[in-house]
Image: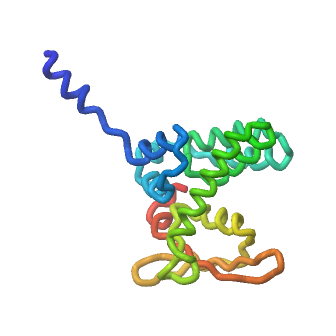
Amino acid sequence: MCLLVLPLVSGAKNPSEYAKLLADLKAGNTNIDYARLRMSYVDSPERKKAKDTTAEEKAMSQALQSKDFAGALKDAESVLDQQYVNMDAHFVAFVAERELGDAAKADFHRTVFRGLIDSIRNSGDGKSPEKAWVVISVHEEYVVLRALGLRPSGQSLVGQNGHMYDVMKAKDEDGNEETFYFNTDIPMKDEKF
């Protein structure tokens, strides 16, 4: 009887690639491959089990705006428990931790935020469909534009060579407009985000 149970116990599922990268990151290794972290999240069991965080995302933003840093941090951590690749939650956690006086934790979240942003920006230059920035959610497009100090001024969806692209027009603070291309194959395939 013991021989029949052993294969079941030893045959437990291996952690997903996302879980391995996430464990490494949470252990303090901020030199991970953030693009792999984001891409592996898309098809991970962790994402399939994740709960909707819309209410917490709204609450963390409102708390941050009202300078309720403890509340903002609590809500950001709730979002990160479900979706650790959420750039807005890392940004809110960064600001909240900084304002609450924990420089080490603030620095960690700032580093993760930058790693996630850079993983998108390093996927191309965003200036053409051929060099479009690859996103795993449409929301990432807006976070990247915001991080660049731009505000969206127009959007269209185009298909080309079997791929889908969001063509985003965005203005800087002086009103100068630029156009950026985001590859939306992943969000178009699966609109859970």
Q: Which quadrant, please, contains the N terminus? A: top left
Residue at image location 74% in from the left, 71% down from the top: 151
Give the quarter of the image for residue 60.
top right
Does 177 sit above or below residue 185? below
In this rendered view, identify the residue nearer to me: 77 or 26.
Answer: 26
Q: Which quadrant, please, contains the C terminus? A: bottom right
Residue at image location 69% in from the left, 51% down from the top: 91
In this rendered view, identify the residue nearer to me: 46 or 120.
Answer: 120
Residue at image location 53% in from the left, 65% down from the top: 135
In this rendered view, identify the residue nearer to me: 89 or 56.
Answer: 89
Does any portion of residue 78 appear in the rendered image?
yes
x then y, percent, for residue 143: 66, 62
Give the quarter of the image for residue 26.
top right
Left or right: 91 in relation to 20: right
Residue at image location 79% in from the left, 47% down from the top: 64
Left or right: 170 in relation to 14: right
x then y, percent, for residue 167: 59, 79
Q: Residue farthest to the top? A: 1
Does any portion of residue 55 appear in the rendered image?
no
x then y, percent, for residue 136: 51, 61
x then y, percent, for residue 165: 52, 76
All told, the count of numbered labels is 0
Does 176 sit above or below residue 141? below
